Amino acid sequence: MFDRILIANRGEIARRIMRTSHRLGLTTVAVYSDADAELPHVNEATCAVNVGPGPAADSYLNTERVLRAARETNAQAVHPGYGFLSENPDFADAVQRAGLVWIGPSPATMRLVADKAQARSLMEELGVPVNAGSAVNDFDDARRVAEGVGFPLMVKSCSGGGGIGMEVVHSVSALQSAVERCQSFGSRFFGSSEVLVERYMANAKHIEVQIMGYADGHVDVLGERECSVQRRFQKVLEETPSLALRQDVRDRLVKAALAGAEGIGYVGAGTFEFLVSDDAIAFLEVNARIQVEHPITEMTTGYDVVAKQLHIASEGQVADLARTTDAVFDHALEMRLYAEDPVRFFPSPGPLDVFTLPDGESIRVETGYRQGNTVSRHYDPLLAKICVGASSRPESIELAIDALSEVNVQGVKTNKDFLLEVLNDADFSSGKYDVRIASRLRSSATKVESAVAIPVVEG
Amino acid sequence: MDVIAPMLANVWKVCVRDGDTVQSGEVLVILECMKMEIPVEAPIDGVIKILVEEGEMVEEDTVLASVGQ
């Protein structure tokens, strides 16, 4: 096991990684920007290094500064968390070249799955179902795909994280402008103008499978998560297990994730994402890192995902089961409390004049902030993850509603009311909801501009 | 008619060019704040005059563009 690791992240995930690290006897190094100097992750670490001014590009994404911080503090390994540098294979390479251990899958694996077209072809070869479609380099190719597959189609850049630059189109003319936009977006932000055009599974559930790969080639599956409550591809509420999912479909998802992970020799924590519609399943992408919503997996399996990551990165395997000391529940759900204007869905940075979050035996809260901190406009709008666990889904939902009633945030606006709307929705309660739920709820409210998530905060 | 920024943000993407004819509702500029994309639309039909550049930081109420006849 390592003696000391550096966490190349901030906020709630930095604290969460530190908590397990300290529990396992490691010392930790935090990095922080000028804008985050007062945040709890800074003084909870064994030591902290300032990596620059507010804007992420100048601080948390500044690979030179982050590496220097690791060297100066004698960290042996780097945990990138999610977002930021977690899916940057060049940074992972640099960490390894500096003689440090990268806590995550290898740069080769990262590169393989980062290219959505490549990941898709690979999964197809391994027998994993994928949506009909293909990678294209121009509109003519895209039109041919449309002729073969029909509409609706999903158009997205082959590079970059999920969420931004994704469009669903229903006609050839919409396809043309979507392809052009994706190409220009892709070139500008990810240096690639390759675009993926696939049949869009409308009315599907977003179900993902958590896997853990070991150095000996063995892969464990740690259950699935349903993440269908999404506003413009930004996850808002996740749950596990997905009780509306038939067992035979679940078995096929697990089988597909195992085939995929084993097939590419995946080592470390990872998530295979799928769309599920009735009994049809289709691979979406692999996220080669820890995910925001991992706590609900921990609450229902008893495993500590971060502990497993640390063991695998340092020893190649997990000698014991890396169990948590916390209770294990039959059902858990996570609510993402975002700093956003609930009417216009704009982000809402500002001071946390009042910041009260719920507490209790069945509640697990992860937050990067304390009262008095400023929610900076330079980072994602996640204020806190409020997770609840229970012995049944109806009980989780009730607990979640109660927990939300204890949330008191003043100084920034939040999506608390939106979360309550979801929890009180009939389709949500029955479990028979799909990825349309958030926009249905939204459209029944005021008709306003909505903000779309850019994929730095992962899902 | 002036098209203004709803909040402090970065001009992430300018989607139209000076002199383009746009329709009401067409996305003119996409701002970015807190990793969220904020589309700003044309309030009326007309000819665009773009007043900001990609990468620029704008404050609330900054005029991003004007739509004229």
Image: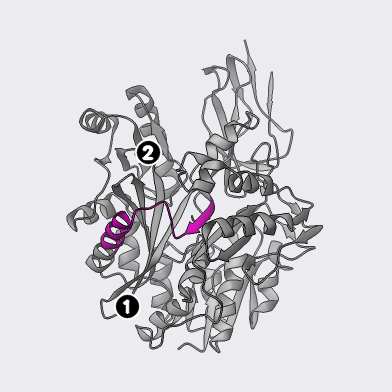
Viewer-proximal residue among A227 and A95: A227
Looking at the rendering, the stretch of residues picked out in magenta corresponds to: A236-257
The residue sitting at 68% across, 33% down in the picture is B5
The residue sitting at 73% across, 55% down in the picture is A405
Disc number placed over residue A183 in the picture, else none: 2
Q: Specify whether A160 is left or right of A5.
A: left
Residue A255 counted in the magenta span: yes
The residue sitting at 22% across, 30% down in the picture is A144
Q: Mark 1 and 2 residues: CB-CB less than 8 Å, in contact?
A: no
| Same chain, labels 1 and 2 | yes
* Helix, strand or loop for disc 2: helix
Subunit that carries the residue with mark 1: A
Q: CA distance from mark 1 to mark 2?
A: 37 Å
* Helix, strand or loop for disc 1: loop
Asked whether residue A27 appears in the rendered view, the answer is no
Disc number placed over residue A214 in the picture, else none: 1
Outermost residue to the right = A353
The colour mode here is one colour
* Of the two numbered discs 1 and 2 in the rendering, the one whose residue sits closer to the viewer: 1
